[in-house]
């Protein structure tokens, strides 16, 4: 499974580029195109409705984060309240109510959805049409932080169980420890996939947009392809970005949509020749 | 004389073991609280201390309620958090 992450500032054309990529990759294998932006635009782009749909050979998924979060939180609340007294339930209840409405948790739901798809190994290619720069960067940092956090919790749980074993005997492993071990392993393998992903950055040829590309390159430490979209004339490319492979897309008076001539041109004449050069795609076909 | 020596040895051994066990028990309780603190408190990178990932682990907590309550009430930071979440229930 090869992971393609498409990032960029809001409104630069991430959806157009990720859709074109997904459609081109579907000629080489099974593709899942997943949107992690809360304000999904894949449905509008393809002119389809629903959380999941098919567009040519591509499976498209736009997870509904609020409803996924609510369902999960209610489940955990039920399980947690089984073990604690009603008075403590009263103390904890506000946290659960807060958590199920907290927008920062929506991003985490999206991260989990991508992780689930990556670890399932059901697809040959996974293309992530991500949210704006902030969310994109959070994905990378959070994933790493989570590995460290699980490691820390594991260490202390192990120590606790070892002490308990010395005092009272009993098992050195329990459900919690096993769960933590699994989570840590999952997170670590997802982190590896994320680090080895093919990172596509979409930018307009404007100063602000290219500055964000520079920030992304500096913070993540890599960028495999820079797509400069909506080019109207000559533009200045900052020095660090000049070393990155670049694809240039002209400005179209009508916004490209699935099925339009401009979209076919972007797909077939601009992106396809680039993809043909990629060694891992050549090997596949 | 031998009997007294034997009794004294057993007495000292028992007393020492008691102290050791007490220490171990205390250490276990402290370790449990550290784990809870790590679990419940905000860790760098997550703005929400009761984030998605913390909630997922809560059902596994089978700690005694007294220690959980003590931790929640004792921690001033969590006290502030409680006030932050007022009105959400």
Image (spheres, coloured by chain):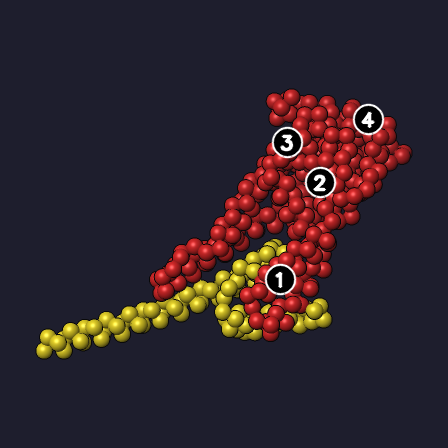
Chain colours: A red, B yellow
Q: Are marks 4 and 2 in contact (CB under 8 Å)?
A: no
Pointer 3 or 2: first along the chain? 2
The picture quadrant where one finds residue A113 is top right
Helix, strand or loop under label 2: strand
Q: Nearer the viewer, mark 4 or mark 2?
A: 2
Subunit under mark 4: A
Residue ID for mark 2: A34
Tell me how far mark 4 sits from mark 2, CA to CA. 23 Å
Residue drawn at x 67%, y 50% is A109
Residue A207 in view (yes/no):
no
Pointer 3 or 1: first along the chain? 1
Helix, strand or loop under label 3: loop
Q: Are marks 4 and 2 on the same chain?
A: yes
**Residue sticking out furthest to the right:** A253
- How far from the left and from the top, in percent, is residue A215? 68, 44
Density class for disc 1 (Cα within 10 Å; few <14, some 14-19, many ≥20) is few
Tell me how far mark 4 sits from mark 1, CA to CA. 52 Å
- How far from the left and from the top, in percent, is residue A130? 71, 43
Q: Nearer the viewer, mark 4 or mark 3?
A: 3
Q: Nearer the viewer, mark 4 or mark 1?
A: 1
Residue ID for mark 3: A124
- How far from the left and from the top, in percent, is residue B51? 63, 58
Helix, strand or loop under label 1: helix
Q: Are marks 4 and 3 in contact (CB under 8 Å)?
A: no
Residue ID for mark 1: A78
The picture quadrant where one finds residue B69 is bottom right
Density class for disc 4 (Cα within 10 Å; few <14, some 14-19, many ≥20) is some
Tell me how far mark 1 sits from mark 2, CA to CA. 30 Å
């Amino acid at each position: 499974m090869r992971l393609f992450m498409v990032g960029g500032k809001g409104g630069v054309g991430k959806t157009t580029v990720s859709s074109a990529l997904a459609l081109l990759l579907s000629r080489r294998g099974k593709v899942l195109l997943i949107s992690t932006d809360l304000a999904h635009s894949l449905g509008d782009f393809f002119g389809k409705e629903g959380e999941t749909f098919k567009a040519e050979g591509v499976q498209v998924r736009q997870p509904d984060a609020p409803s996924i979060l609510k369902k999960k939180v209610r489940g955990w609340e039920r399980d947690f309240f089984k073990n604690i007294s009603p008075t403590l339930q009263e103390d904890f209840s506000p946290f659960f109510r807060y958590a199920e409405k907290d927008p920062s948790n929506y991003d985490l739901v999206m991260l989990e959805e991508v992780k689930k798809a990556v670890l399932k190994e059901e697809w040959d290619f996974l293309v992530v049409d991500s949210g704006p720069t902030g969310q994109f960067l959070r994905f990378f940092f959070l994933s790493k932080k989570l590995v460290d956090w699980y490691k820390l919790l594991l260490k202390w749980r192990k120590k606790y169980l070892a002490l308990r074993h010395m005092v009272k005997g009993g098992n050195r492993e329990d459900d919690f420890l096993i769960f933590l071990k699994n989570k840590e392993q999952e997170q670590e393998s997802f982190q590896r996939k994320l680090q080895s992903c093919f990172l596509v950055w979409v930018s307009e040829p404007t100063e602000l947009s290219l500055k964000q590309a520079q920030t992304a390159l500096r913070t993540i430490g890599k960028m495999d392809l820079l797509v400069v979209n909506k080019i109207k004339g000559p533009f200045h490319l900052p020095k660090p970005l000049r070393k990155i492979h670049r694809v240039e897309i002209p400005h179209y008076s009508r916004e490209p949509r699935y099925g339009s001539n401009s979209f076919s041109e972007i797909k077939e004449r601009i992106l396809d020749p680039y993809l043909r050069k990629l060694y891992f795609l050549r090997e596949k076909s | 004389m031998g009997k007294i020596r034997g009794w004294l040895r057993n007495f000292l051994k028992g007393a020492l073991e008691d102290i050791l066990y007490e220490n171990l028990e205390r250490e276990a309780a402290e370790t449990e609280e550290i784990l809870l603190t790590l679990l419940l408190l905000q860790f760098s990178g997550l703005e929400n201390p009761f984030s998605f990932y913390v909630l997922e682990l809560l059902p596994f907590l089978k700690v005694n309620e007294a220690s959980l309550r003590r931790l929640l009430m004792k921690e001033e930071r969590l006290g502030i958090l409680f006030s932050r979440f007022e009105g959400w229930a």
